[in-house]
Amino acid sequence: MANPIPYEFILDYLPADIIVKKMFGMHYIYRGKKIMLILRKRDNEPELNGIWIATNKEHHKNLVNEVPEIAPFSIKGDDQYGNWLFIADHSENLEEATIRVCELIVHGDSRIGRLTEKPPL
């Protein structure tokens, strides 16, 4: 049985030209040659479940100020979270925060998205 896309409501708020790829038990969302988001809802390591936002460290503070539900991304307490930000699955305002991030993507906000070496097929 195929795993359904978690947080499927997100598809109603993203541009029509996105591409969704399933890899490693997660759903990766691309727009053009950029990875924009990863949707994760798995049984293992539930603390990593939520919406992962591709960005650059230089934009973290501004994005967190704009969407307070966004948090630094860490794996097993490692503060070296790189270029990703995160809306946790258990966030009280998960849907509202995610919709706001989608609005930024729709409007081409350059703070969200990272070029990939290989664009999705």
Image (cartoon, rainbow, N blue to C red):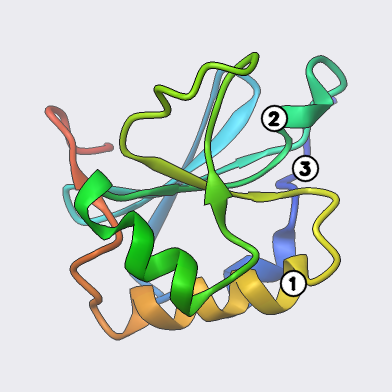
Which residue is rendered at x = 20% and y = 56% of the image?
32
Give the position of the N terminus as an image quadrant. top right
Q: Pointer 3: residues within 10 angstroms few (<14), some, or many (20+)?
A: few
- Residue 51 in the image: state x and y as whole percent: 61, 49
1 or 3: tag closer to the N-terminus: 3
- Residue 52, relative to residue 25: is it above or below? below
Identity, as a three-letter code, of the amino acid under mark 3: Pro
The reply to whether dot 2 and dot 1 touch (C-beta < 8 Å) is: no
Q: CA distance from mark 1 to mark 3?
A: 17 Å
Residue 13 quadrant: bottom right
Which element is circle 2 on? helix
Question: Could you tell me if the residues under marks 3 and 2 are in contact, i.e. CB atoms within 8 Å?
Answer: no
Could you say which is closer to the camera, residue 14 or residue 59? 59
Question: Which of marks 2 and 3 precedes in the sequence?
Answer: 3
Q: Residue tagged by mark 2?
A: 48
Residue position for label 1: 95
- Residue drawn at x 40%, y 67% as measured from the top left: 63
Q: Nearer the viewer, mark 3 or mark 2?
A: 2
1 sits left or right of 28 in the view: right
Q: Which mark is residue 4?
A: 3
Q: Residue at x 26, y 45 (%)?
A: 57
Q: Quadrant of the C terminus?
A: top left
The residue at the point 65 percent across, 14 percent down is: 76
Q: Nearer the viewer, residue 105 or 12?
A: 105
Q: Which marked residue is nearer to the observer: mark 1 or mark 3?
A: 1
Image position of 28 with respect to 22: above or below: below
Mark nearer the N terminus (2 vs 1) = 2
Cα separation, mark 3 vs mark 2, equals 18 Å
**Image coords of residue 72 (percent x, y):** 51, 43
- Amino acid type of disc 1? Glu
